[in-house]
Image (spheres, rainbow, N blue to C red):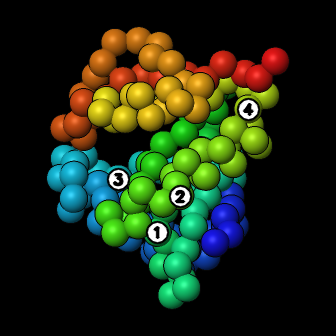
Amino acid sequence: MEITTRTGDELTAADVYEIWRIRDVVFAVEQQCDEPDVDGVDLRPDCTHLWFAGDDGRIQSYLRTFVAGGVRKIGRVATLKEVRGQGLSGALLREVISRYGDEELRMGAQAYLENWYASFGFEVCGEPFVEAGIDHVPMRRPANR
């Protein structure tokens, strides 16, 4: 499979539909998040969406990255349950690190994934918090030197 990458201003209506579909399945249905997903970031030109799609064109694994407050953030990491364990999210993270690793990267990671993100060089950088009804920890990956 090949990684598809598009900025917010390059997305087609079909792309937006697929992005919101996977995030709805993973976050709203599976994880029962209690906050809206649409936050005004997705269509910005500084928001880059990365994903793997199956042969049917449906997104199977996804994340986005954008700049907020001068810092690059990673978020909305989602993989469909039926394809987890195949390394798709890890490949997307490695792509983000390859593209943007010369700058600090930050995220609010779901707490149960702290060790997994640590394997990519992220470290906890603050106090745990609850977002969308789910325990999270702030994490950062220092810029490559």
Cβ atoms under marks 4 and 1 closer than 8 Å: no
> Please, what secondary structure does the residue beneath circle 4 have?
loop
> Please, what secondary structure does the residue beneath circle 1 have?
strand
Query: Which amino acid, by three-letter code, is at mark 4?
Result: Gly
Query: Residue under circle 2?
Result: 88
Q: Residues within 10 Å of mark 3 (few under 14, many from 20)?
A: some
Residue pictured at 53% horizontal, 30% vertical: 119
Query: Residue under circle 3?
Result: 37
Q: Earlier in the sequence, mark 2 or mark 3?
A: 3
Residue pictured at 51% horizontal, 18% vertical: 123
Q: How much space separates mark 1 and mark 2, taking CA atoms?
A: 8 Å
Q: Position of residue 134 (x, y in %)?
A: 23, 36
Q: Earlier in the sequence, mark 3 or mark 4?
A: 3
Query: Which amino acid, by three-letter code, is at mark 3?
Result: Asp
Cβ atoms under marks 1 and 2 closer than 8 Å: yes
Q: Earlier in the sequence, mark 2 or mark 4?
A: 2
Q: Earlier in the sequence, mark 3 or mark 1?
A: 3
Query: Which amino acid, by three-letter code, is at mark 2?
Result: Leu
Q: How much space separates mark 2 and mark 4, taking CA atoms?
A: 19 Å
